Image: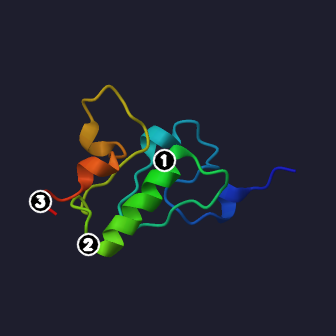
């Protein structure tokens, strides 16, 4: 039985979003809630890792909003970052 997860999920990007374009259209900021729907999609794993780094003060792009979608590379500052590229230099 399929539940209506997206109706009760408080995360900005919900893995159960019925909008087929949610990965391109919905933004998430470091520190915001992560959808708890399982099994986790890759973007949820990245969000959890980013939030862990935010809590430790080791994520350098906390003011940037992200989407899940990786487009053609032109929008690299608005797509979910690779975590290793978001760590502070020399630290």
Q: Name the residue under label 3.
A: 90
The x and y percentages for residue 88 are: 18, 59
Which structural element holds mark 2?
loop
Residue where numbered disc 1 is placed = 43
How crowded pointer 1 is (Cα within 10 Å; few <14, some 14-19, many 20+) is rated as: some
State which tag comes first along the sequence, 3 or 1: 1
At horizontal 32% and vertical 25% (from top left) the residue drawn is 72
Judged left or right of residue 6, residue 82 is left
User: Distance of mark 3 from mark 1, alpha carbons?
Assistant: 26 Å
Q: Which of marks 2 and 1 is in front?
A: 2
Q: Name the residue under label 2.
A: 57
- Give neighbour class at mark 3: few <14, some 14-19, many 20+ (Cα, 10 Å): few
The residue depicted at 34 percent of the width and 42 percent of the height is 79
Q: Are marks 3 and 1 in contact (CB under 8 Å)?
A: no
Picture layout, residue 79 above or below residue 13:
above
Q: How far apart are marks 2 and 3 (CA)?
A: 14 Å
Q: Which of marks 2 and 3 is nearer the N terminus?
A: 2
User: x, y percentage for residue 4?
Assistant: 75, 56
């Amino acid at each position: 039985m399929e539940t209506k997860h997206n109706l009760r999920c408080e995360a900005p990007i919900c893995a159960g979003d019925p909008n087929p374009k949610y990965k391109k259209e919905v933004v998430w900021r470091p520190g915001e809630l992560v959808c708890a729907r399982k099994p986790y999609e890759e973007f949820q794993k990245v969000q959890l890792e980013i939030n862990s780094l935010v809590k430790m003060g080791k994520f350098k792009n906390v003011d940037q909003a992200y989407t899940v979608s990786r487009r053609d590379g032109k929008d690299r500052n608005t797509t979910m970052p690779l975590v290793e590229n978001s760590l502070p230099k020399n630290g």
